[in-house]
Amino acid sequence: MEIIRDKQFGGERPLFGVKDVRLENIEIVDGESGIKCCNNVEADNCRFYGKYPWWHVDGSLITNCYFAVGSRSAIWYSDNMTMKDSVIDGPKFFREMNNLTLENVTINDADETFWNVKGIKVKNLKLHEGTYPFMNCEDIYIDGLECESKYIFQYCKNLELHHANIVTKDSFWECENVTVYDSVIDSEYIAWHSKNVRFVRCHIKGDQPLCYLDGIVLEDCTFDPGCDRAFEDSKNIEADIRGGITEIKNPISGRIHAGSIGRITYDRFALGHDCIIETEE
């Protein structure tokens, strides 16, 4: 493998088409498309300032690197990538990709990041600011997530999430096959219009959670007192709630068991009354 170190590049496509290259202490300072249409590229302790610096690269290892605000839309159409111990300040990263692995990565502007990515493995990811991270992604495994970006996990399939602390707007919308373990989800309208969603040992906060679902399982979960109108028009519910829940509204079918329930509401718009609701009181 060729090694290029301690150099600065700028302008248009300075490293276009390189193969089997390791970059050490490199700066891409300006211009566009610094690394494009490449194969088997490693980068360690490098800094990227120009636009679109990493497109159409098959086989990447990125460690201890920094992507500045100006490196927007930096990593697209690049399969088989691993990134570790790096910081990203630019928006719109990771688009149209397959097989992406991240470990100890911080993204300070997660706006429209992770779109249409298949095969994601994550260990310790921090997301700040921005909207719609993980739009239309599939086959996702995450262990360790801190997120304050809005509208996370929309239109996702096959998601397994562990040890997350999420503060967001709408989350897990129009998703299919989702399991969340040992996490805190602080979100309005959690998992609306989704299928086959399971929360295990989670704490749920926010208005109107878990509505319009087909297939929702809760195991040993707790609810914040502000969670009102839960389960509206949801069917195939299997929920064991530890402690109390403020309000359940218009559930269609299944079973809900809770320590206590503040109120159960069926209004004239209810689509069914076949859900079994039990308390310990």
Image (spheres, helix red, strand yellow):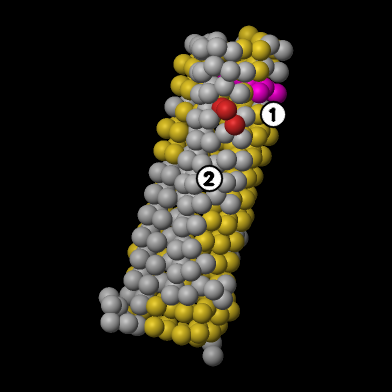
The spot of residue 275 in percent (x, y) is: 36, 79
In the depicted structure, whether residue 71 falls above or below residue 277 = above
Q: Which residue is mark 1?
A: 64
The residue at the point 61 percent across, 34 percent down is 88
- Asked whether, in this view, residue 60 is left or right of residue 84, the answer is left
Q: Is residue 162 visible?
A: no
Q: Which residues are magenta?
A: 41-47
Q: Amino acid type of disc 1?
A: Asn
- Asked whether, in this view, residue 236 is left or right of residue 134, the answer is left
Answer whether residue 280 is magenta in the image. Answer: no
Label annotation for residue 96: none
Q: Residues within 10 Å of mark 1 (few under 14, many from 20)?
A: some
Instruction: Determine the main secondary structure of the stretch shown in magenta.
Output: strand
Q: Residues within 10 Å of mark 2 (few under 14, many from 20)?
A: many
The residue at the point 57 percent across, 57 percent down is 167
Distance CA(mark 2)–CA(mark 1)? 23 Å
- Asked whether, in this view, residue 57 is left or right of residue 201, the answer is left
Label annotation for residue 130: 2
Tag 2 secondary structure: loop
